[in-house]
Image (cartoon, grey):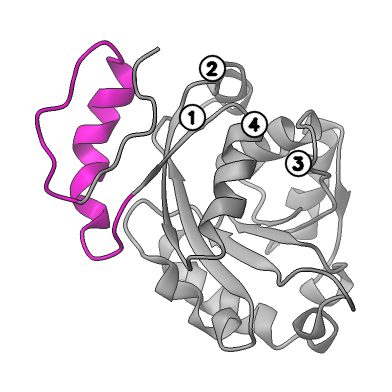
Amino acid sequence: MNVIGAGKVSRTLMSLTRDAVGFTLRDIASSREESARAAVTAVSGGRAVASFAGMRPADLWFLTVPDDAIAGVAHELAGVSTLARGEPGAPRPVADHCSGFLPSEALAPLRDLGWLTASCHPVRSFADPDLAARQFPGTLCGIEGDAAAVPRIEAFVSAIGGRPFAVTAEKKALWRSPSKHRNLCRDMVPSWNPSGYRPLRLRD
């Protein structure tokens, strides 16, 4: 798995991926190379690179950048010819962003290259990456995207201890606020369902 972005969400996912069965943390890129290096040092895993051109192909890409940067990063990433081709015989790469509001359509430049796209928003605070990683098991993660991408993101979420559920792209933002309360109070049964929310084994 490759990661673009070196903030708190990135560090949490990197830490969880390091110990996940079936997934390997590969390359980390950020707008500042020193940030990528600091993230790699913090989680003791992955390889910091100076630019997208220095990244190796991967089956799974997580874009953990601000919402207003997602489309631009996708466009820039799509312009790297060595990544656009992928590895011979490898499955189609899946690009995923972590926005709680934007749909996977924000990754259209990569989809146009033949990549699969998805969005996965873990419903929790990442203010303290170390604490977020320790408390991540059981975290609800709303997923939408290409039909072939969603099962692969669900597998990743399950591998790092999360609890995936499907959400529609059209109404994605509607579930974000109430689902925050759902994750903080897991014994409460949500009474809303305006967004196409489909829980998967919500009760412990």
Give the CA separation, mark 3 to mark 1. Answer: 15 Å
Q: Which circle's residue, 4 or 2, is located before the other in the chain?
A: 2
Give the CA separation, mark 4 to mark 3. Answer: 18 Å
Any mark on residue 135, and which?
2
Q: Which circle's residue, 4 or 1, is located before the other in the chain?
A: 1
Q: Which residue is mark 4?
A: 160
Q: Is there CB contact under 8 Å for labels 4 and 3?
A: no
**Disc 1, SS:** loop
Residue shown at 80%/85% (left/top)? Answer: 85
Q: Which region is colored magenta?
A: 167-195
In this rendering, would 58 be left or right of 188? right
Q: Crowdedness of circle 1 by 10 Å Cα count: few (<14), some, many (20+)?
A: few
Query: What quarter of the picture does the C terminus occupy?
Result: top left
Q: Which circle's residue, 3 or 1, is located before the other in the chain?
A: 3
Give the CA separation, mark 1 to mark 2. Answer: 12 Å
Any mark on residue 39, and which?
3
Q: Which circle's residue, 3 or 2, is located before the other in the chain?
A: 3
Identify which amino acid the numbered label 2 is placed on: Gln
**Camera-side mark, 1 or 2:** 2
Q: Nearer the viewer, residue 152 or 16?
A: 152
**Picture coordinates of residue 37, whole percent (x, y):** 83, 47
Q: Which residue is mark 1?
A: 127
